[in-house]
Image: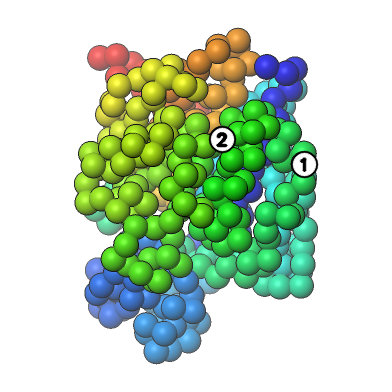
């Protein structure tokens, strides 16, 4: 490994507008819930495009949002998106002398874009090629119901792609492919990158990069044809170029076209994915490795953090937004730290431990991105959760 590991990421980066304490079972929300796949209605845990939701509801989104929230202002504005949130967490959990985390993307030349730029500069991430263009900044309204699923919480996402439509493969410079690790995060919300993912992954592997892909709910392809599996790039050849694929349970089912996690895992194995993590909210994760990148690991289930579950019962002010993205960041940070420690084949179970406590810690604050007052602050806060989790799984 080089003296400094370069991690470069491309994918979803946007402004999150967070509304907490929205009751998904209320009479106000119930009329806007989806009745069938891809119809444009709201589904807990899923994402829908703003334009499709307006078609579904027959009304302006701003009017409906005003009705659902009682006309209140969002509880928090924050940096959001499966790519940038995971990269920020990875940069906070690694030594900046030994790792540089870079981000590539586009925002809009508007107030939201200016907010993103100023906020991103408060994190350790390097904005390698992030520009504001004449378009709307990508954004997501996040409605959060902390009491959903017996207090485990869940969210609904209403997304506007905006300037992310404009970013394509030709915008990625050679430095991106000269990185040690490349991460494609939530590319379903950066359509030109997503549709060319096979080619981009193949190029990255030809340059010797470690490739990590973390997915997001692909409403574009769900709407296009809800009866067939989602594509990942130009063909299923994409999977053979992935060192680590991270998806939640619903995404794994839709990407594989299978109905349960076991057969979905068999699909990814048949397509030659080197290692895989499937998350499932507050339930166990499933993970395996064929030994090409991580050490060999037979299919294994791992629980979520009991310390986080216990604290959630009395927690105020937090939500589950960004838990999955921070999970990914914790895994990436563990990979970096293990490689810097001279480990040739990183330990996947150890990486999952770091991911699980990172995702769990995100429940303690509102929104996905945690802004540190001092470098190393987040690492220090997460360490007791890591120690408790290691004890939990050893017992």
Name the spot of residue 301 as percent of width and height, x first. Answer: 27, 29
Name the spot of residue 219 as percent of width and height, x first. Answer: 42, 65
Q: 234 or 355: nearer the eye? A: 234
| Location of residue 361 with respect to 219 vertically, above or below | above
CA–CA distance in space, label 1 to label 2: 15 Å
Q: Residues within 10 Å of mark 1 (few under 14, many from 20)?
A: few
| Residue 305 located left or right of residue 201 | left
Specify the quadrant that holds the C terminus. Answer: top left
Q: Residues within 10 Å of mark 2 (few under 14, many from 20)?
A: many
Name the spot of residue 366 as percent of width and height, x first. Answer: 49, 51
SS at mark 1 in the image: helix
**Which numbered dot is residue 174?**
1
Q: How is the image coloured?
A: rainbow
SS at mark 2 in the image: strand
Q: Quadrant of residue 190?
A: bottom right
Name the spot of residue 261 as percent of width and height, x first. Answer: 25, 42
Specify the quadrant that holds the N terminus. Answer: top right
Residue sitting at 37 percent across and 52 percent down? 255
Residue 16 shows up from this direction: no
Please give the residue where the numbered disc 2 appears in the rendered image: 211
């Amino acid at each position: 490994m080089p003296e400094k590991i370069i991690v470069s990421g491309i994918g979803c980066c946007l402004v999150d507008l967070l509304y907490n304490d929205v009751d998904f079972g209320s009479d106000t929300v119930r009329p806007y819930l989806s009745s069938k796949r891809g119809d444009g209605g709201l589904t807990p845990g899923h994402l829908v495009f703003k334009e499709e939701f307006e078609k579904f509801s027959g009304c302006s989104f701003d009017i409906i949002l005003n009705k659902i929230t009682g006309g209140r202002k969002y509880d928090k504005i924050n940096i959001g998106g499966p790519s940038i949130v995971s990269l920020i967490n990875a940069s906070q959990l690694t030594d900046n002398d030994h790792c540089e985390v870079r981000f590539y993307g586009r925002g809009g030349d508007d107030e939201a874009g200016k907010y993103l730029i100023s906020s991103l500069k408060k994190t350790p991430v390097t904005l390698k090629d992030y520009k504001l263009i004449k378009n709307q900044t990508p954004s997501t309204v996040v409605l959060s119901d902390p009491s959903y699923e017996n207090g485990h919480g869940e969210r609904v996402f209403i997304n506007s792609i905006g300037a992310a439509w404009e970013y394509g493969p030709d915008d990625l410079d050679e430095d991106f492919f000269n990185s040690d690790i490349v991460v494609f995060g939530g590319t379903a919300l950066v359509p030109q990158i997503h549709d060319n993912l096979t080619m981009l992954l193949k190029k990255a592997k030809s340059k010797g990069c470690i490739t990590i892909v973390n997915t997001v709910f692909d409403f574009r392809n769900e709407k296009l044809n809800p009866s067939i599996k989602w594509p990942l790039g130009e063909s299923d050849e994409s999977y053979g170029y992935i060192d680590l694929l991270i998806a939640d349970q619903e995404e794994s089912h839709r990407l594989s076209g299978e109905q349960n996690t076991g057969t979905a895992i068999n699909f990814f194995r048949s397509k030659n994915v080197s290692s895989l993590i499937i998350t499932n909210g507050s339930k166990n994760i499933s993970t395996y490795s064929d030994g090409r990148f991580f050490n060999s690991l037979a299919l294994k289930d791992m629980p979520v953090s009991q310390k986080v579950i216990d604290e959630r019962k009395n927690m105020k002010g937090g939500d589950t937004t960004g838990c999955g993205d921070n999970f990914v960041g914790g895994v990436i940070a563990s990979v970096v730290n293990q490689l810097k420690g001279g480990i040739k084949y990183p330990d996947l179970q150890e990486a999952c431990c770091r991911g699980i406590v990172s995702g769990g810690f995100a429940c303690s604050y509102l929104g996905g991105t945690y802004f540190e007052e001092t470098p190393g602050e987040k690492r220090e806060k997460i360490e007791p959760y890591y120690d408790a989790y290691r004890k939990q799984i050893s017992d």
